[in-house]
Image (cartoon, rainbow, N blue to C red):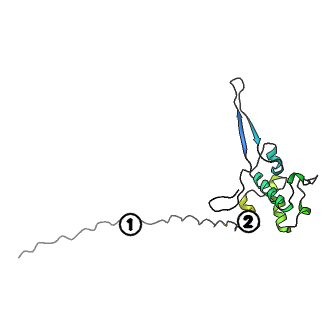
Amino acid sequence: MRRKSDKKIVLIDFGAVKEINVLTTANQPGTTTLTVAVGTPEYMPSEQAIGKPKLSSDIYAVGMVGIKALTGKNPGNLPKDPNTGNVIWRNEAQVSNYLANILDRMVHEYFPQRYENAKEVLEALGLTTPTIRPKPKPAPQPTQTKTVVAKPQPQPQLKPNKS
């Protein structure tokens, strides 16, 4: 989709998940929650397909879009490694190892091996600089000050002039 405000192409609707709560009666305490995955199966990671999406599930989908763009093949038509479940696609595209490694991590079958968010992907691509958090400055220590109370000094009494 092309965004009207700046004419940039953007992706939308990844990870559209609808949660349905089943109402219970007094005789059936507790709530059952079902998650219905919505999306195109070829672009959906396995954890989302079984109704347990993770934060990195959208990263998988975007990676699959990239692989389709490079190979021209629908991700569902690409083979998967029988041992890892990872998609095999590199032999179908001419791409640098650098970019291929990033895409492989984006579409890794085991979700903890994926990038956690889009910012990490952009950093890997060199499209943004890593956020360097400055070390917090130590809080100023309260200084002890000595309070000096001035004692009134007796004033000499003036003697009246006897003139």
Residue under the image location 81 percent in, 45 percent down = 49
Per the image, the residue denoted by label 1 is: 148
Callout 1: helix, strand or loop?
Answer: loop
Q: Amino acid at mark 2?
A: Glu
- Decide: few, some or many residues near mark 2? Use Cα within 10 Å; few <14, some 14-19, many ≥20: few
Residue indicated by mark 2: 123
Contact between marks 2 and 1 (CB within 8 A): the answer is no
Is 67 situated left or right of 83 in this image?
left
Residue 48 — which label? none
Q: Nearer the viewer, mark 2 or mark 1?
A: 2
Residue 136 position within the rendered picture, expressed as x and y whole percent measured from the top left: 61, 65
Element class at badge 2? helix
Q: In front here: 89 or 19?
A: 89
Q: Residues within 10 Å of mark 1 (few under 14, many from 20)?
A: few
Quadrant where the C terminus lies? bottom left
Q: Is residue 16 above or below residue 71?
A: above
Instruction: Residue lying at the far top in this picture: please name it.
Output: 27
Q: Quadrant of the N terminus?
A: bottom right
Place of residue 19 in the rendered image (x, y in percent of width and height, measured from the top left)? 71, 40
Of 1 and 147, the residue lying toward us: 1
Left-right relation of 107 to 145: right
Spatial CA distance of label 2 from label 1 is 59 Å
First reached walking from the N terminus: tag 2 or tag 1: 2
Q: Nearer the viewer, residue 81 or 111?
A: 81
Q: Residue at x 84, y 64 (%)?
A: 101
Work out whether 48 lies above or below 116: above
Please name the amino acid that badge 1 sits on.
Val
Residue 35: x and y, percent? Answer: 75, 40
Residue extending farthest bottom: 163
Whether 66 is drawn above or below 29: the answer is: below
